[in-house]
Amino acid sequence: MKNTLISILSIFFIFACSSTPVEKVDVQETKTVDLTASKEQTSDDGVVMNSVDVGEAYVTILFDYDDETLREDSLEELFSISRLMKSNSKYTLLIEGHADERGTREYNLALSERRAKAVEDFLTATGVSSFNIEVVGYGEEMPVDAKSNESAWSKNRRAELFFIK
């Protein structure tokens, strides 16, 4: 556990020093935490509390082919989720891991679980209680795009985060 925490924080600091701009890809509509909202909608630490829709996909984290490593472009959203979860522990976060259709069913199920677990590990390393997180992997069973091409596969390699009561 200690080594995992050190590894995650080391990776973060390496990416934080990067000067290469990251191009964001809008794969599907997701809701994000707006930390610049007006004072009347935010808690004391600046986290928006009114924007959480329980049961709807809140954030989608994308992954590279055959990989469960968190991408640099997802860290800002994950830090926002971490701040929200730490400031409001009444929510439980459901993390659903997914994979594209390539590979065996068993392999994709394990890969999707590792992807969801990578998100959980990051959040717990930033201080979110593991008691407020549930993790499940669906493999290739729930694609957002059923086509068999790279564009579709890139959308299906994901972890979706849902707030539940």
Image: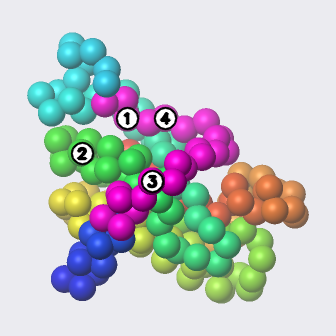
Tell me which numbered mark, 3 or 2, is placed earlier along the sequence.
3
Q: CA distance from mark 3 to mark 2?
A: 25 Å
Judging by the rendered image, the residue that carries numbered circle 1 is 33
* Coordinates of residue 146 in the picture (x, y in percent): 82, 57
Q: CA distance from mark 1 to mark 2?
A: 10 Å
- State the residue at coordinates (30%, 78%): 7
Q: Name which residue type carries label 2.
A: Arg
Q: Dividing the picture into quarters, in which one does residue 110 lie? A: bottom right
Most foreground residue, 58 or 17: 17
Q: Name which residue type carries label 3.
A: Ser
Q: Is residue 29 rendered magenta in the image?
A: yes
- State the residue at coordinates (46%, 42%): 58
Q: Name which residue type carries label 4.
A: Lys
Judging by the rendered image, the residue that carries numbered circle 2 is 83
Secondary structure beneath dot 1 equals loop
Quarter in which the C terminus is drawn: top left
Q: Which mark is residue 143?
A: none
Q: CA distance from mark 4 to mark 1?
A: 7 Å
Q: CA distance from mark 3 to mark 4?
A: 27 Å
Judging by the rendered image, the residue that carries numbered circle 3 is 19
* Coordinates of residue 30 in the picture (x, y in percent): 54, 38
- Judge the density around disc 1: few (<14), some (14-19), many (≥20) Cα neighbours within 10 Å: many
